[in-house]
Image (cartoon, rainbow, N blue to C red):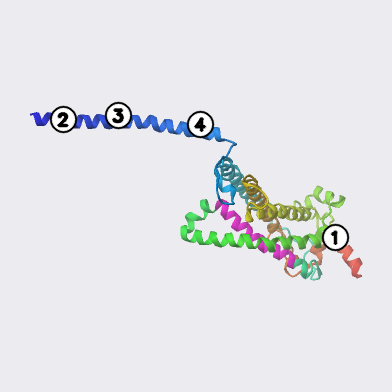
Amino acid sequence: MRLFNIKRTFWAVLVLGLVLGLGSMAPASAQQAADESALLQQLKGAPVAGRVSIPDAKSGVLIQPQGREWRETLEGPVKSAGGWLLVITVVALAGFMAIRGRIKIDAGPSGRTIERFSGIERFAHWLTAICFIILGLSGLNLSFGKTLLLPAIGPEAFTGLSSFGKLAHNFLSFPFVLGVLLMAVLWIRHNIFNAIDMEWFRQGGGLLQKGVHPPAGKFNGGQKIIFWSVVLGAAVLAVSGYILMFPFYVTDIAGMQLAQIVHAVAGIVMVAIILAHIYIGSVGMEGAFDAMGSGQVDMNWAKEHHSLWVKETQARVGGDD
């Protein structure tokens, strides 16, 4: 009987100790969370830094509270708004195709052609276009790959693809910038907005209604918007991208965080704009791809979409109608 009482007392003390221990841990965890929240609130806007003996002084920063805001901005509004922008763009283009259909040559192909773009112009365009496609896809992978691509292809393939994409993204930025600069030199004088473009916009560029063909020079109002979007967008992407590629040469961590947000936003907007450009220059309009394919376009297509340019070209070379 005495041995039985000792065992009962032992187990009672053990159970009571566990209960008291668990009870004391819960408030402690809650208190710890409250302390961490208060600490983060106090540290907001003031990084915690110490002293280091190496030349890289920035490595002494232990906590940089703005990094939390930067990450939340990228993963929150930038990612969600950017994703919706791309979805809306694709849906809008599909809807336009379904309603308007492919824009045909109203007069039908004439069988005669006129040179639209020279070899150097096509080289500049395709150099820029091919680089941008790879840059755009690898950049989108950074933003949406973990959500969309990783579950589909698995971690090993995703890691290899992302590693290759990172290298391509860095190195192809240089020929991309070169291509944009070359296009700017070749075409900037043709892309100054004027009163003719206002009339082109007023008539919807002839895209909304069959048989409507507002006059235009070498580039119409819509193409001028694409041109300036590419030139200015490339400038923003290049500056912000090279700040990220060569970290801490021209700015501190706060500047790099801002550069990454600017780079992401500009990149997604550029992708949306170029999607519209690709659509109208390929399946959206009959004869449009020939301009950057062979460089020769059908005469009736040229007269319907760039009538002023046709007259100027024929007057310069002494051609006829």
Q: 41 or 290, which lies in front? A: 41
The residue where tag 1 is placed is 307
Residue 8 got which mark?
Answer: 2
Query: In terms of secondary structure, where does tag 4 sit?
Result: helix
Magenta residue span: 123-144
Q: Dot 3: within a 10 Å radius of its alpha carbon, few (fewer than 14), some, or many (20 or more) residues?
A: few
The mark lying in front, picked from 3 and 1, is: 3
Residue pointed to by mark 3:
20
Q: Are marks 1 and 2 in contact (CB under 8 Å)?
A: no
- Residue depth check, mark 1 versus mark 2: number of the one nearer the observer: 2
Q: Quadrant of the C terminus?
A: bottom right
Q: Which mark is first along the chain, 3 or 4?
A: 3
Contact between labelled residues 1 and 3, with CB atoms less than 8 Å apart: no
Give the class, few, some or many, for how many residues have Cα within 10 Å of label 4's Cα (few <14, many ≥20).
few
Q: Quadrant of residue 27?
A: top left
How far apart are the two marked residues, 4 and 3, measured between alpha carbons? 27 Å
Res. 38 mark: 4
Bin the neighbour count of mark 1 within 10 Å (Cα to Cα): few under 14, some 14-19, many 20 and up.
Answer: many
Comes first in the chain, label 4 or label 2: 2
Amino acid type, mark 2: Arg
Whether the magenta-drawn stretch holds residue 127 is answered as yes
Marks 4 and 2, how far apart at CA: 45 Å
Kindly identify the amino acid type of the residue bearing the numbered disc 4. Answer: Ala
Tell which circle, 3 or 1, labels the residue nearer the N-terminal end. 3
Whether residue 311 sits left or right of residue 163 in the image: it is: right
For residue 22, side relative to residue 313 (left or right): left
Say which amino acid is labelled 1.
Ser
Residue at point 51%, 52% (across, down):
146
Q: Specify which label sits upstream in the sequence, 1 or 2.
A: 2
Nearest to the eye among marks 4 and 1: give it: 4
